[in-house]
């Protein structure tokens, strides 16, 4: 099993409650790499806004990944997930091909339809028909990264003889975060990988999601095992001293066919990373 971590980017991710500097994000990423972890991931948001609470900020995801690409040279780089609503799908594909080249072929392009309506309103992005918009954007981005040249006439997007030049050096893998039937079917149709989150371990909810993904794959004539399965694990502050428990959770994930655990530690600290690495080592030793 591959094991990755989400990076500190947002307000509250470090102990004094402020937004981390890039130097702090980089130090966390480098330590994760030095411990043998397999991937590092960013969240893609513009702001967090809840009624009755102060607004909270976060660094921009794509700029951060681009900066990390040459400074953290081994691990896979991903987004959990880039919001397709925020970027034109042709531009998204162009950015992904360029970043993958910068990173030496280590990008996994995570995509999702978005969910936090206040940031859409604040930055003037349409929130209606999100899955319908996402379906068109996912198809366009995927086909471009597969080196197709085509025109597209959908309900909301029109592309005229679009192509990526220079072409991508490789087929950049696309991951889709999906739970509902329509999104799962889109995942099975276009994606190379799938993510569902957040969990503390294998439970009935996760088993149901895995079964629904299998069903979606069969519905489009795809072998379920051809899709890389990633699961987001939330590691809370009171769990950061229990490597044995984490190892057991990782064992359980392997048993139900999960390929990657992506760990969101609410404590973005070096001791938390060390705990994750210890859990990983115990898991791999048992396997």
Image (cartoon, rainbow, N blue to C red):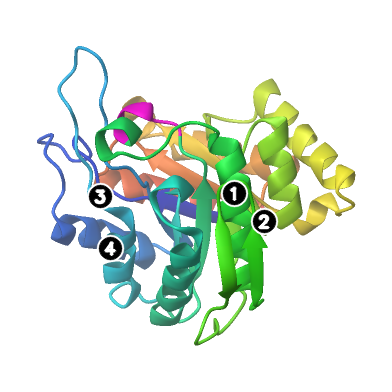
- The secondary structure type at the circle numbered 2 is loop
Q: Is residue 44 visible from the viewing direction of this image?
A: yes
Q: Position of residue 138 (x, y in %)?
A: 60, 54
Q: Position of residue 97 (x, y in %)?
A: 48, 75
Main secondary structure type of the part rendered in magenta: helix
Give the mark nearer the N terminus: 2 vs 4.
Answer: 4
Q: Residue drawn at (33%, 60%), measured in percent from left and top?
A: 62
How many labels sit on residues?
4
Question: How far is the residue under mark 1 from the one under mark 2?
Answer: 6 Å
Question: How far is the residue under mark 4 from the one under mark 3?
Answer: 23 Å
On whether residue 248 falls in the magenta region, the answer is: no
Q: According to the image, label 1 marks what residue?
A: 176
Marking on residue 191:
2
How many other residues sit within 10 Å of disc 3, few (<14), some (14-19) or many (≥20)? few
Question: How far is the residue under mark 3 from the one under mark 2?
Answer: 33 Å
> In the image, is residue 230 above or below residue 91?
above
Q: Residue drawn at (37%, 65%), measured in percent from left and top?
A: 33
Q: Position of residue 12 (x, y in %)?
A: 19, 34
């Amino acid at each position: 099993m591959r094991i990755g971590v989400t990076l500190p980017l947002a307000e509250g991710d470090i102990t004094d409650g402020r937004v981390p500097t890039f130097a702090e994000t980089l130090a966390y990423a480098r330590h994760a790499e030095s411990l043998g972890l397999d991937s590092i991931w960013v969240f893609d948001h513009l702001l967090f806004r809840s009624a009755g609470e102060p607004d909270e900020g976060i660094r921009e995801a794509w700029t951060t990944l681009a900066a990390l690409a040459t400074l953290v040279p081994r691990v896979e780089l991903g987004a959990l997930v880039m919001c397709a609503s925020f970027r034109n799908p042709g531009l998204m594909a162009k950015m992904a091909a360029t970043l993958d080249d910068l990173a030496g072929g280590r990008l996994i392009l995570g995509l999702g339809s978005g969910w936090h309506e206040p940031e859409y309103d604040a930055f003037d992005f349409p929130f209606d028909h999100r899955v319908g918009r996402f379906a068109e954007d996912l198809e366009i981005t995927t086909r471009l990264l597969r080196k197709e040249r085509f025109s597209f006439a959908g309900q909301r997007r029109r592309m005229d003889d679009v192509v990526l030049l220079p072409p991508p050096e490789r087929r950049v893998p696309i991951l889709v975060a999906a739970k509902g039937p329509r999104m799962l079917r889109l995942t099975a149709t276009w994606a190379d990988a799938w993510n569902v989150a957040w969990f503390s371990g294998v439970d009935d909810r996760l088993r149901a999601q895995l079964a629904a993904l299998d069903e979606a794959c069969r519905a489009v004539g795809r072998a379920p095992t051809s899709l890389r399965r990633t699961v987001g694990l939330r590691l809370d502050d009171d769990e950061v001293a229990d490597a044995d428990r984490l190892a057991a959770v990782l064992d359980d994930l392997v048993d139900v066919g999960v390929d990657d655990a992506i760990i969101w530690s609410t404590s973005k600290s070096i001791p938390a990373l060390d705990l994750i690495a210890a859990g990983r080592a115990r898991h791999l030793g048992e396997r």
